Amino acid sequence: MELRIGSRKHTVTDFAQASQIYCLARDISGEGSSTFPTGKIIGVDGPHYISYNGKVWKGTPKNWKPGDVPVFGKRFKAVAIKGDEHAIPNVSKTRRQCPD
């Protein structure tokens, strides 16, 4: 499975890891929902995407409608520490937290 965030690509094993990496990249960027790109997941059954809140949805953002249920919606605390540089560039010694 591959997660794409803008021009960046990350190999991921599951939706949980994709969501975690997306949240870390989002938090490190300091960008808001209007400027940070939606995450795209490739290599699973049909298109999937990650919204700004870290939830994974089947389809594309254009297909979303009220009442849709995310494929993965677990909220977690993600902390990047020194040694995670391979996952996200420029993460060294940075501590960020995804919202509850």
Image (cartoon, rainbow, N blue to C red):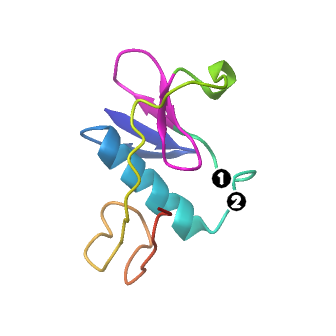
Residue 16 relative to residue 9: left or right: left
Residue at (50% x, 63% y) in the render:
99
Residue 1 pos. (x, y %): 31, 32
Q: What stretch is highlighted in magenta?
A: 40-58
Residue marked by disc 1: 36
User: Is any atom of residue 11 visible in this view?
Assistant: no
Residue 81 relative to residue 71: left or right: left
Tally of numbered tags? 2
Residue 66 pos. (x, y %): 66, 26
> Which amino acid is tagged 2?
Gly
Residue 68 pos. (x, y %): 56, 24
Residue at (51% x, 33% y) in the render:
49
Residue marked by disc 2: 32
Residue furthest to the front: 67
- Give the secondary structure at mark 1: loop
Quadrant of the rendered image containing residue 51: top right
Residue at (59% x, 41% y) in the render:
38
Asked whether residue 84 is drawn in magenta, I would say no
User: Is any atom of residue 14 visible in this view?
Assistant: yes
Q: Is 81 drawn above or below residue 55 in the view shown? A: below
Residue nearer the viewer, 74 or 23: 74
Q: Do the residues labelled 1 and 2 touch (CB within 8 Å)?
A: yes
Residue 27 pos. (x, y %): 54, 66
Residue at (68% x, 23% y) in the render:
62
Residue furthest to the bottom: 93
Q: Is 81 drawn above or below residue 29 in the view shown? A: below
Q: Disc 1 and disc 2: Cα gap in Å?
A: 6 Å
> Which amino acid is tagged 1?
Phe
